[in-house]
Image: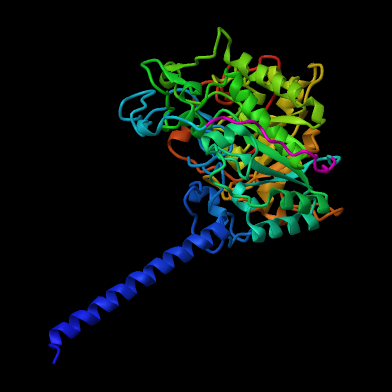
Amino acid sequence: MVPIELIVRRRAGVLVVAFLVLVAGVIALAQQNREQDPAGEGLSAGAGAEAVAPEVEATAPGAADVGVDDPLGGNGDALPLVADAADGGALHDGAATGGQFGDVAGETSPANGAGSTNAGAEAIGGPLPPLGEDVFPQVPAPRVPKPRAVRGLYVNAWAAGSPRKMANLMALADTTEINTFVIDVKDVTGYVSYKTGVALARQIGADRDIRVRDIRGLLDQLRARGIYPIARIVVFKDPLLARKKPEWSIQADTGGIWMDHNGELWVDPFNKEIWDYAIALAREAILLGFSEVQWDYVRFPDVPRRYMETAVYPARQGRTREDAIREFLRYSRERLADLGVPVTADVFGLTVSAGSDMGIGQRWEKMLDVTDVLLPMVYPSHFAKGSYGIPVPNADPYLTVRTAMEYAIERSRDVPGAAAIRPWLQDFTLGWPSYGAAEVRAQIKATYDAGIDEWILWNPGSNYTAAALAPENGEPPDLPIPVHRPRITIQDTVQRAGDAVAPRLIGVPIDSIRRVVPDTTSGR
């Protein structure tokens, strides 16, 4: 007779084996689902998804948002819109919260001080596979003609790769004034959204985090609906390229790769090889069926002064930051001229009113005649209290956007061959007050009232407020222009000399443009 103890041990062994087999099966199934559904629909954001700030994801109570239940809403590029417009985690290029540049009181620094590169240094550099050659589509795909006036939405890479999300967004475009999607081709992670034939992207592994499995199919759907697709390409904030080709990165004056105050890596904006990489991605995108190129992060890092002073640019050759940005824009437009598409660039919202380049290389007049469209990111939440004489710009979206657009128009007036102006507008909540349909529509109205008829909405999760949009070929929604009364603190009651007469600007103010800014706290 077999001892009872032995029987128990055998049965326990069988149960353990069965459990291990079950676990292995679950893991395999999960991996299969990840491969089949890279967008992560029905799942939390997977590896490679960009962090999303909850305050940016929040929407005003009662807002009708497209795709609000889609977990892709937490994977947007450019979320916090803090320190490059929405650029912690993954961002859109924009101004730091409050519009502050230079040293900021109370900020934290990497452990080894400004420009330190100790963290993760072991992942930098190393041998790369052979470069190979660029393989572009042999037959250019048909392109959607530019609408008379662009009215667009930003679509992050994860949303673009989600059939359910795209169905919602295309339905929104079918029934409203929306006629344009700005889609990530390469975002701030450095990864290309779809399979690419660009040799350098393959060499550094930028094709290893695919978000859009069928880019041709997606562009076919947009073409069938007459939706104008714009290729958004992040240029100089490319941590992947900086790690894989450290000799192309910004260097630290003490040696090694320079890091900004958030511990992130940038490539050298003076380096022509980096320009050529961005241009190759743009050429491929146009041949695939995109109709316009939009450069983002076409600037130097916006960092505290002590970090800026430690940065070394190996390819500088005596040029200024403004020179680098202007030369890249001019060169890229020349290299893409044979394709016959607009080449455009995103700029900080404060660029329209600052007389200096703010340390990032963006001076309005120097960019205006080497692009087809400039897109200032005039998000009201990104302006400091008192900017343009407005107590709380975020609480007065109409006046903030209209004032910024008036600066842009005035500064463009006497520039031969000046680019068109197409602002990025805010469809997200960042701080007080919450943004809903009235706040979004107020910005659109401000744009029209300033004399500009194009705009694009930004929401990092690609969730938009449908109630703010006019129906297709219909009248815009009749919404009040909101002016929220600022919350008064003891500090706010202290009158400082000049506060009532001098609008606060970042950089050197433009002396030739003076306006009497009305008091908006009493409502309209």
In this rendered view, identify the residue nearer to me: 463 or 268: 268
Residue depicted at 29% across the width and 78% down the height: 15
Range covered by the magenta-colored residues: 130-145
In this rendered view, identify the residue nearer to me: 59 or 246: 246
Residue 295 appears in the figure: yes
Coloration of the structure image: rainbow
In the picture provided, is 68 more to the left or to the right than 51? Answer: right
The question of residue 448 being in magenta is answered with no
Residue furthest front in the image: 1
Which quadrant does the C terminus fall into?
top right
Point out residue 474 in the picture as x, y percentages from the top left corner: 85, 54
Point out residue 256 in the picture as x, y percentages from the top left corner: 39, 21
Which quadrant does the N terminus fall into?
bottom left
Residue 58 appears in the figure: no
Q: Quadrant of residue 418?
A: top right
Point out residue 196 in the picture as x, y percentages from the top left corner: 64, 40
Residue furthest top in the image: 318
Q: Is 59 drawn above or below residue 268 in the view shown?
A: below
Prevailing secondary structure of the magenta residues? loop
